[in-house]
Image (spheres, rainbow, N blue to C red):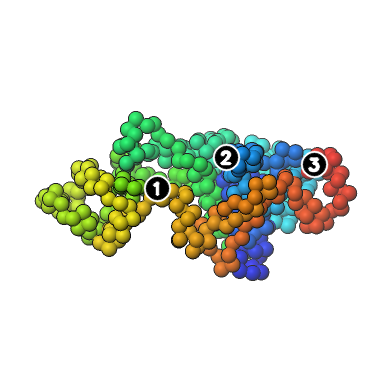
């Protein structure tokens, strides 16, 4: 792993990102914010398909998702199916520490980017394969959307649950909004890549096989654990024993009381109502078995409470309570501002828009820059300045649609 030249942990690390999935692109984003130089390869002419994925910014045909997951990257265009294109990739990989790819295994060998082929030429390179179902197994060549990867990880089977299921009992299993499963897969890829970089000097190159499905199954580890105990969880039985999401006069709170003292604090918070004095409520096991009865009382009481007041009084009693906030409230929250979670990024044609930085902070604050306006905006910087080719060569490759 190259020695850091400043306070960013991945300064000096070069990542070649050949990914069209959200998972791979999100991983590249995180690596770039840690200081790595991330060079994104896009198809000549068409660019990354994610550029055309909604939602779009202010009615423009500009993908908000693409803008978010591709900040701080260089963009080059390269057709790997051509001999010159493949040769240029070889040159890039000689200068790289990480090659991140989400081409399915069936197509990799034809392009000359199979892990074994790459390892023969670049034995010290980390090859990060980011695929819906991993690089081996019966499903390794399957294409998948967010819907497939989320449900294949088991989470959809358990949703909706708790209050949502009570309010909408006929609702079928649902997908979490947005690209949740892909972001989880991308986060796993980042962890694998950093782990590989930490030992790269000692062990050399490695194949890092990241499966988005595997990453999402890991989120349901407690449900898998319970299956080992003979309990098959489903959305009708998956909820807190009592508590969970509670509806108040002006919003919602989350309540979780796992300890005896927290239950006792909740009783005081509710004003020691008569129903809490029943003998069976003194036994935590009985409370767990009869959580539905308890929740009827708690939810009826919560509907007369105001969120902010309830949270403050709950904290004073040692009761784990938290407000459920919407996106607009997160943007305006003092805690959000104190951590500089959002910064304004100038998007060409749209203007300045607030964008989430990263789920971590470094000694050197992370900075966001708008991604290249067009695919291949960094071609000259990479092919000419970094690799040493002439402008005439670049013009010829452009005319031949290699770049």
Dot 2 crowding, Cα within 10 Å, few <14, some 14–19, many 20+: some
Does residue 198 appear to the left or right of 280 in the view shown? right
Q: Residue at x 45, y 61 (%)?
A: 335
Query: Marks 2 and 1: which is nearer the front?
Result: 2
Which numbered disc flags the more N-terminal residue, 1 or 3? 1
To which quarter of the image does residue 230 belong? top left
Q: Provide the secondary structure element on which disc 3 rests.
A: loop
The reply to whether discs 2 and 1 touch (Cβ–Cβ < 8 Å) is no
Residue 402: mark: 3
Name the residue at 39% across, 36% down: 157
Percent x, y of residue 174 = 42, 35
Measured as percent of width and height from the top left, residue 224 is found at: 37, 44
Q: Is residue 263 visible?
A: no
Spot occupied by residue 284 in the image (x, y as percentages of width and height): 19, 52
Drawn side of residue 225 relative to residue 122, left or right = left
Give the residue number, with chain letter if any, for mark 2.
Answer: 55
Give x and y (percent) for residue 40.
68, 49
Q: Give the residue at mark 1.
A: 221
Point 30% across, 39% down: residue: 237
Closer to us: 80 or 21: 21
**Classed neighbour count for the residue bearing mark 1: other residues with Cα under 10 Å, few (<14), some (14–19), many (≥20):** few
Please tell me which residue lies in front, 280 or 267.
267
């Amino acid at each position: 792993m190259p020695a850091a030249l400043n306070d960013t942990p991945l300064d000096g690390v070069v990542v070649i990102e050949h990914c069209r999935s959200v998972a791979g692109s999100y991983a590249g984003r995180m690596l770039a914010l840690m200081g790595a130089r991330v060079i994104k390869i896009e198809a000549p002419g068409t660019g990354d398909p994610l550029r055309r994925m909604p939602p779009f910014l202010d009615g423009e045909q500009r993908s908000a998702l693409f803008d978010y997951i591709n900040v701080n990257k260089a963009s080059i265009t390269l057709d790997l199916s051509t001999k010159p294109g493949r040769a240029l990739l070889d040159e890039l990989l000689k200068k790289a520490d990480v090659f991140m790819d989400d081409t399915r295994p069936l197509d990799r060998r034809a392009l000359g980017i199979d892990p074994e082929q790459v390892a023969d030429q670049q034995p010290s390179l980390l090859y990060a394969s980011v695929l819906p179902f991993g690089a081996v197994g019966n499903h390794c060549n399957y294409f998948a959307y967010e819907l497939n990867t989320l449900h294949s990880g088991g989470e959809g089977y358990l949703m909706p649950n708790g209050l949502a299921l009570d309010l909408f009992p006929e609702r079928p299993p649902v997908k979490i909004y947005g690209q949740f499963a892909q972001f989880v897969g991308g986060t796993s890829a980042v962890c694998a890549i950093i782990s590989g970089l930490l030992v790269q000097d000692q062990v050399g190159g490695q194949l890092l096989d990241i499966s988005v499905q595997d990453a999402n199954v890991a989120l349901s580890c407690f449900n898998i654990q319970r299956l080992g105990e003979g309990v098959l969880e489903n959305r009708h039985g998956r909820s807190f024993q009592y508590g969970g999401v509670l509806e108040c006069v002006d919003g919602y709170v989350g309540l979780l009381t796992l300890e005896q003292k927290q239950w006792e604090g909740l009783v005081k918070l509710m004003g020691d109502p008569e129903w809490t004095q029943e003998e069976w409520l003194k036994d935590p096991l009985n409370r767990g078995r009869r959580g539905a009865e308890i929740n009827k009382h708690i939810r009826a009481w919560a509907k007369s409470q105001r969120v902010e007041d309830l949270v403050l009084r709950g904290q004073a009693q040692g009761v784990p309570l938290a407000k459920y906030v919407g996106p607009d409230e997160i943007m305006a929250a003092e805690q959000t501002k104190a951590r500089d979670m959002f910064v304004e990024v100038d998007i060409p044609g749209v203007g300045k828009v607030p964008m989430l930085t990263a789920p971590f902070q470094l000694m050197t604050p992370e900075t966001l820059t708008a991604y290249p306006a067009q695919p291949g905006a960094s071609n000259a910087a990479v092919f000419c300045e970094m690799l040493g080719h002439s402008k005439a060569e670049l013009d010829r490759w452009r005319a031949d649609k290699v770049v």
